[in-house]
Structure formats: structure tokens, C-alpha cells
Image: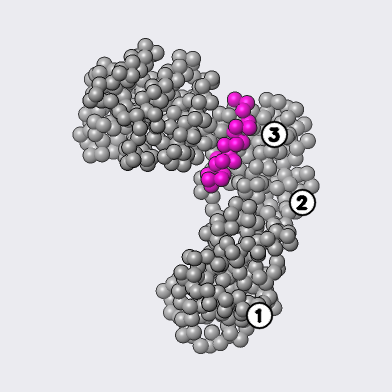
Amino acid sequence: MYNLRILRQFRYSWIAPTSATKLPHRLLASQHKRRPQLGAVPSDQLDQLKADYFERNCELSNEEWQQVKHTLTNTYKYISGHNVDAVILGMCSTGEQLPLAKSYLRYLQAQGVEPNAATLGRLLRVYNAAYHTRALSDEEQSEIVHICDRLQGNHELLDASSCEHLVHGLVATTHHWQRAVAFLEMMKVTSAPSISAYSALAGKAFSSDHPELAWQLLEEMLETRKLPKCEVYLAHLESSARDVKTLGSQVERLLLFLERHDILLSDKVAQQLVALAQRLPHQLQVTSTHLEQMGKCGACQQHLEHVAISDAQFAELRRSFLDKVLIRKDVFQKSTPEEVARFKKFVEQTAPYDCVIDGLNVAYSTGTKKPPQQLAKLLATVVRFFKERRKRVLVLGRQHMRSWSKPAMNYIQNNASVFLTSNLSQDDPFLLYATLRSGQETDFFSRDLMRSHAFLLGTELKATFRRWQQEHQYSLVTQTQTGQIIVKEPIRYLLSAHKVNNTWHIPCTETYTPNPTDRFQAPEKWLCLKIA
């Protein structure tokens, strides 16, 4: 067995390495990047090898391990003597394969080979996989600690991949997991900590009754635009359920966090909330539901809160937009101060509008290679859509649009205000400025998600901008063969978790994704939740 005696032998051999094998204490400049993840061998080429050696055995003989090693290094060009050990342990990916991984370490010991940092890091990940299937024994936890001590002792500064392995190893222990905080900080020296590392440590903090550390890590994640994994929320709910008296306040804190950061719960977490309510009905009432027309909850029949921002928020957004987005060097690279001044004067003279249309964005919605006649006709159809609703429209476009189909362009100019910028101008800032300048009731028409502009406004104003954008953005879905257009109208109610008359409504998504869409789509599944 891979026991403490073997680990101690590794440690002593590492403390006094030979000059030929001694590793540097400080990272070289070229080592600042995260190591490539080893073990990502094409599965279709390794099925036979896995079937022969990795699926049927919990232990292999030294001769069998030698054969595995020989097969890998002689078959794949990117596997060499330097990384083959980490690749093999990477193939031991499940918790049930921990004995197999230990068997390979004994083989290396018998060969007089000292495992490198990548190899031991992979072993820590196998321990972590086992930890998620069962409780690790005291001996196994001691083995993890000895590996961590050894890796830390050999390097003054570890690279990001090694730090991540250490984090995942330490969270599998009962008494040493808080050491992982230092390795998470060390990761920041060379790269941003990953979602996986953050989530593993935050989940462990919740499970170990250190909620403030967990919330601190979660807030830090969101500041770097990283979305926590489901395991964090599951750990929070599990730890909250231990004290029935504080369960309600702990669930409320989670929901406020979801609301503040506009996070959708995965079905996995939603099911856990439903199960928790079934177990503790006097503390929680949770119902899976859907939304009816106009954002009415199918369970409690209440309408979701309107997405509109306040007059004060709108005024702040409008004030900030000019300095933070419109008057910037990268805008002037594609325009000029004179053109911006000309546009502002035009808006002052012709505003307010009911809707501002990005002309090129609309014209190219169904393809950029269509003849100018079709592009102009489509834009005229969108103008007609608002004209029939008695809306006052501004169309923004480029100078080259003057050469488009005369009948269509004449219709546009006769039924809308038109401002054409130079052919190098950037349209979006002009579009947003005209819309914001016209007032709280003005809409705009564009398929652009405005991500960069929202980012430039900063964290606080970004949330305000997104709510305003959701309420006011129209876009073209498609144009039918008969020339009719299908328009996506704004969703006027909140799409994030929020409370209505002491009842929470929480949007859900089928599965977790680290990169949620910025598109405004109403989720099909919701939770209707009330805290007693």
C-alpha cells in the first residue's frame, strides 16, 4: 500500500536532491503561465488500453505498468518520459481508481523514480475524486497533507496548476483545508484562480461552518466575472439545514446574492431547494412553476416586478454615459470630435424620439451579402413597423447608404429623422446616446448585445444599464418570404431572482454553464419560494 513510510521516503529524497535533479526554488519568467493540463489523451485511441489496464484492475504489476508506459510514449508524440507519469495518473480520473493510482506510485518507487510536481498534483485530484464519493480515512488524509508539504517545501513559488492541485487536495481533508486559502492567493501571482478552485474552496468553507470565508470567496469570484459551480450552493443549503432556527435567514442570504449578481439556479440546486422544503415545510415553501402572460407566476398568481429603473438611476446612467462611453479615444479613432459635436447638436434639435434604429444593424440582420435594394427595403419595413404604431423614429446610418434604393430611402427619410455618420464611425455609442438623451420612455432597435459598453460603465452602472437595456431593446428575429418581419419585443419584467410581496421568484436553467448568455430570454422554469 501507498503508506506514510513511502511518503516520508519521498520527502527525504526531495529535501536533499542531487544537483542533476534539483528543481529551482523560484519560477523562471517563462513559467508564469498555467501549465497545460496533462492527461487529455484522445479517448477513442485509448479505449483498448483503458479496457486492458485501467477498468478491470485496482492494482497492476510492475511489468504491466512498464507496458502501459511504453505503449503511451511510443504511440503518442506529445507524451514523453517527462510527462508520461502525469498522463497515466490523469487517466485515473475517478475516485474508485485511487488504489490504481497508488499502485502506479509504488511502481515508480520501485524504479527509483521521484514523481514530479505534475504527477503528484494529478494524484491529489484522484484523492479529491474519491472524497466526493466517500469519506477519506485518516491515513488517506495524512497522505494528502504529506504530498502538499513536499510540494510546498520544494518550491518557494508554485505555478498556478500546482496550486490548483493543492487546493483540490486540501479541501478533501477535515483539519487542513484552510491551508488551501494561501495556495489560492499564490495562484494570483501567476494567473487568475479558476472557477474550479474558487468553487471547491468556497464549498468546503460552507461545509466546515466558515460561511463568511465562503461568501468572501463568492464575491471575489463575481468581481472577476466567474460564476460559482453548483457544488457551492449545495454545500450552503446542506450546512444551512443543520440549524432549523437560522435556515430562513441563510436561504434569504443566498437569494439576495443571486438577485444582486443576476444568477440563475441550475435544476440540480433547484431540486435541492424543493427537497429541503419538503423536509422542513414549516420553514420553507417551494414550488416549481412557470410564467404566464405578462410575467404572472403560475403558482402564486402574482406578477413579477417591472424591470424599469428609477428616474434617479436613469439620470445617473445618462450622465455617466457621455464621459465613460461616447467621449473616449477609441470612439474618436473611428469618428471625430467634430462629428460627435455635430451629432449632439442634431439630437438636441430633433429629440425626443420614441425609438432609435441602428440602420446598418437592421439592414444586415438577414445577411450582409444581399443587394442594397433589399437592405434598404428591410430597413424601410422596420421603420414602417414603428410608424404604424405612431412612434417618432430616428434612424442612424452611414454615408454610403445614400446610394441605396431611392424609393426605400425616400420612405425612410420621409417617415423618420435620419443621421448618417462617416463610413468609419462606430454606431453603438451614437445609438445609445440618442436613446438615453430622449428620456426614460425611448426604445432602440438593434441586435447588438452592447457588452463592451456595459463593461465600460463599471460594476454598479452595468447592472442599471442591463435593466434599462432589457426594457427598451427591440431586435429583428427574421423576415418571412412575403416580406413581413417578426420582431422580438422587450421583456418588461425582471428575469433575475427577486421578491414580490414576501414571495421569492427564482429563475432556473437546466444545467450550470460558466458563460451564461447575455441575451434577454425568459427562462421556462422558475421557483416560487416563501420563507416562513
Q: Is residue 167 visible?
A: yes
What amino acid is found at the position of numbered circle 1 in the picture?
Thr
- Where residue 211 sits, quadrant-wise, is top right
Instruction: Say which residue label 1 marks.
Output: 350
- Where is the N terminus found, in terms of image quarters? top left
Q: Is residue 362 visible?
A: no
Horizontal side of residue 169 vs 318, given as left or right = left
Instruction: Say which residue label 3 marks.
Output: 250
Residue 85, x across and y down, in percent = 30, 28
The magenta span reads 208-228
Is residue 84 a member of the stretch shown in magenta?
A: no
**Residues at marks 3 and 1, CA–CA distance in whole angstroms:** 52 Å
Instruction: Say which residue label 2 marks.
Output: 302
What amino acid is found at the position of numbered circle 2 in the picture?
Gln
Is residue 251 depicted above or below 318 in this figure?
Answer: above
Is residue 148 depicted above or below 35 in this figure?
Answer: above
Is residue 227 depicted above or below 245 in this figure?
Answer: below
Q: Residue at x 77, y 31 (%)?
A: 282
Mark 3 or 2 closer to N-term? 3
Is residue 129 depicted above or below 419 in this figure?
Answer: above
| Residue in the foreground of this view, choosing between 62 and 157 | 157
